[in-house]
Amino acid sequence: MGLVLGLDLRGGAHLVYQAQSPTNVDVVFSEPFSQDDVEEALVAMGYPTTVIAVFNMEQFSLDIPGLPVGRAEQFVKDLEEQLVTVTEFSESREGRTRLEIRIKDPPNETQVAEAIHGAGFQDAIVTTMMSQAFRVENIPEFTAEQQDSLWDALDQIFPLLDFQLGLIDEEVQARVLFRSIPEEVSFEEALADLGHGRRVVITHDGKNFSTTVGTLDEAERCRLRKH
């Protein structure tokens, strides 16, 4: 592993950079194996986080975090003890960066009400209209300055898309609309726009996303933060 940097992004996300330089070992076995067979062998050897790419049933590419420089030959010997003879192997090492994007919990009525009450509108009543959208009733008309202040307070909860204030059913009401929770494709398109190609971004819970790109310098990190 390597350097880990965390950064709070404006609007409800936390971006973590983790510099990595795993050893890549390409191996060709004398007999065919499944990916599961290779994974079991690597776990037994103490490398459970190895990333495996399968070219065919005899040829595999192994990305091995934590394998020291110059240890590939011994690694291959240990692998042979678990499986069969390795007829060919090659070693390389390439710097890269693991990105983890952690999204805040979506906004709820309590958070929205606290922001509005904190802005001085203690009698306001907040109800949920749909995901990311809220109705605010029992409020007076705002001044432009008050509306700007309230926008800032709501935007701290989650990125704010729109805030509408008007007369509805003869009563002053507001509509608060937050931005939608991003999906994998949103991050994939952003990375492609920044020149990192079509990277696969994965998530297991819809809130935490991860992917791997090449080594990032400070200028590239700034571009990624602003995108």
Image (tube, rainbow, N blue to C red):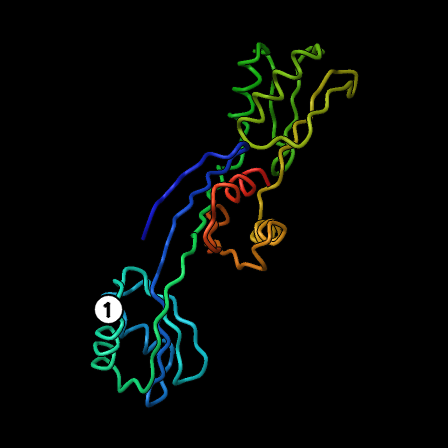
In front: 36, or 94? Answer: 94
Q: Quadrant of residue 72?
A: bottom left
**Badge 1 is on which residue?**
71
Q: Is residue 21 left or right of residue 55?
A: left
Q: Is residue 60 above or below residue 211?
A: below
Q: Position of residue 169 (x, y in %)?
A: 78, 20
Residue under the image location 46 percent in, 38 percent down: 14
Residue under the image location 73 percent in, 16 percent down: 172
Residue under the image location 43 percent in, 52 percent down: 97
Dot 1 lies on which element?
A: loop
At label 1, which amino acid type do we have?
Arg
In front: 52, or 122? Answer: 52
Q: Position of residue 42 (x, y in %)?
A: 28, 71
Q: Position of residue 17 (x, y in %)?
A: 42, 45
In front: 31, or 102? Answer: 31
CA neighbours of label 1 inside 10 A, class few (<14), some (14 to 19), many (20+): few
Q: How many marks?
A: 1
Q: Position of residue 49 (x, y in %)?
A: 32, 62
Q: Is residue 163 above or below residue 32?
A: above
Q: Quadrant of residue 170?
A: top right
Q: Is residue 86 left or right of residue 139?
A: left
Residue under the image location 32 percent in, 60 percent down: 65
